[in-house]
Amino acid sequence: MRIDLHTHSTASDGTDSPAGVVRGAAEAGLSVVALTDHDTTAGWSEAVDALPAGVTLVRGMEMSCTGRGEDGRPVAVHLLAYLFDPTNDAFARERLRLRDERTSRLRAMAEKMAAEGLPIDPDAVMAAAGPAAGRPHLARALVEAGVVGSVNEAFADLLRTGGRYYVHKEDTPLPEAVRMVSEAGGVSVLAHPRASSRGRLMDMNQIGELVADGLGGVEVAHHDHGAADQRILRGIAADLDLVVTGSSDFHGSNKSVVLGEFVTDPDQYDRIVESASGVDVVVG
């Protein structure tokens, strides 16, 4: 079995449709793929309808959270949520709030750029972004306008956290997010917690604290984790008896990674499925 538990579609900031992601999973030889768009379940239905025979779909989401940084200050952290009940009222309200934060933040950043003379049309950016708006949508607009040569270049300068055009958004406190996932019958896994190329890191001691809130696992094999990072995370997961996952974090043409570039061991995947009570996996 080849299992990829972290992918994005056009329901958030990927470039492939949800149907395209599951078809691509089959073409990549995956047995299991998780659709984990940012703060939304909007792609679930399309992915289910298009699911090829022989592929199992794990319905999930990547949640925008605030954790405790190594320096004690708040830091952005992402939380993967798998197989939760999307009708859980408290969790549904929080997803809606997060999407509103995304939309208002992206418009504010686009308007800042336009006000300083960059060839960016905020209305066009928002129309292209949809409800799960994110900085990659603005990055693509900058590429199309010839301001930068690539999405990575946009994030390295104009869109970087704390940079000239950056606008803060209010994400969910990490302990609260973990509890919400658990209360909705899902399983939570910290996404790329040692991805230093993205900026400041969360305090690794917080991982142990989150176990009491229901944290299920840690994403270890990821293109933003070097060998040393993976050793650190595997040690923490072993000490805390947490699930260890590996994933591509596929975003289509927005990133150079391919589906199945990193995978999850079948026994670790089984632990996730056995622990969840929100929704079942869907077998194609």
Image (cartoon, rainbow, N blue to C red):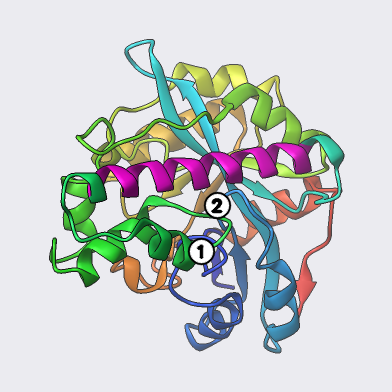
**Residue 243 seen in the figure:** no
In the rendered image, the vertical position of residue 68 relative to residue 34, given as above or below: above
Q: What secondary structure is the magenta-colored segment mainly? A: helix
**Image-quadrant location for residue 90:** top right
Amino acid carrying mark 2 in the image:
His
In front of the other: 205 or 89 = 89
Which residue matches tag 1?
Answer: 8
In the rendered image, the vertical position of residue 249 relative to residue 260, given as above or below: above
Which residue matches tag 2?
Answer: 38
In front of the other: 40 or 220 = 40
Amino acid carrying mark 1 in the image:
His
The residue segment tinted magenta is 91-113
At label 1, counting other C-alpha atoms closer than 10 Å, the crowd grade (few under 14, some 14-19, many 20 or more) is many
Which residue is depicted at the point 71% across and 67% down? Answer: 44
Q: Is residue 104 magenta?
A: yes
Looking at the image, do the residues carrying marks 2 and 1 touch, with CB atoms under 8 Å apart? yes
Q: Horizontally, is 230 left or right of 159 in the view?
A: right
**Image-quadrant location for residue 212:** top right
Residue 216 in percent (x, y) is at 66, 37
